[in-house]
Amino acid sequence: MSCFYVTLVTSATLHLTGLFDLTQIIDHLGELMSVAMIVGFVMSFAVYFGAIFFHWGGEPIRMSGWRVYDFFMGGESLSYFVRVFPPVRDAC
């Protein structure tokens, strides 16, 4: 919860000092969301096909057998970040 307050204080400070105008986010929201979704899809494809074609450590990656689930959740288990980042675009 403290990260939320740090973000609010930082945003307010940058806006009030004139270093960053928060209305820029609203003015360019469409472009920002489009780029976020494209990056999410590219990341999902990279993780999914990386798990299919590259065998880390010489052993095949264990998949669930459900292609849609494996695509969105990622087939490889390199890190928690790799499994969580691709579905972020669904929340947009």
Image: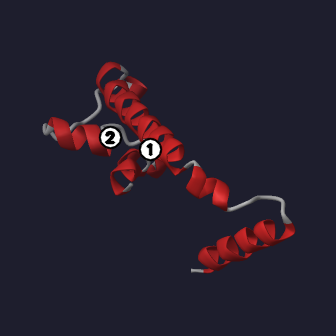
- Closer-to-camera residue (4/67): 4
**Disc 2 vs disc 1: Cβ atoms closer than 8 Å?**
yes
Marks 2 and 1, the one that precedes in the sequence: 2
- Seen at 47% across and 36% down, the residue is 39
Q: Quadrant of residue 40?
A: top left
Q: Position of residue 91 (x, y in %)?
A: 36, 57
Q: Is residue 89 left or right of residue 62?
A: right
Q: Is residue 6 left or right of residue 28?
A: right
- Find residue 91 and name its label: none
The amino acid sitting under disc 2 is Gly
The amino acid sitting under disc 1 is Val
Q: CA distance from mark 2 to mark 1?
A: 7 Å
The residue to which callout 2 is attached is 74
Quadrant of the image for the C terminus?
A: bottom left
- Seen at 26% across and 37% down, the residue is 71
Q: From the viewer's perspective, is residue 26 above or below residue 44?
A: below
- Closer-to-camera residue (56/22): 22
Q: From the viewer's perspective, is residue 2 above or below residue 89?
A: below
- Seen at 66% across and 71% down, the residue is 7
The residue to which callout 1 is attached is 82
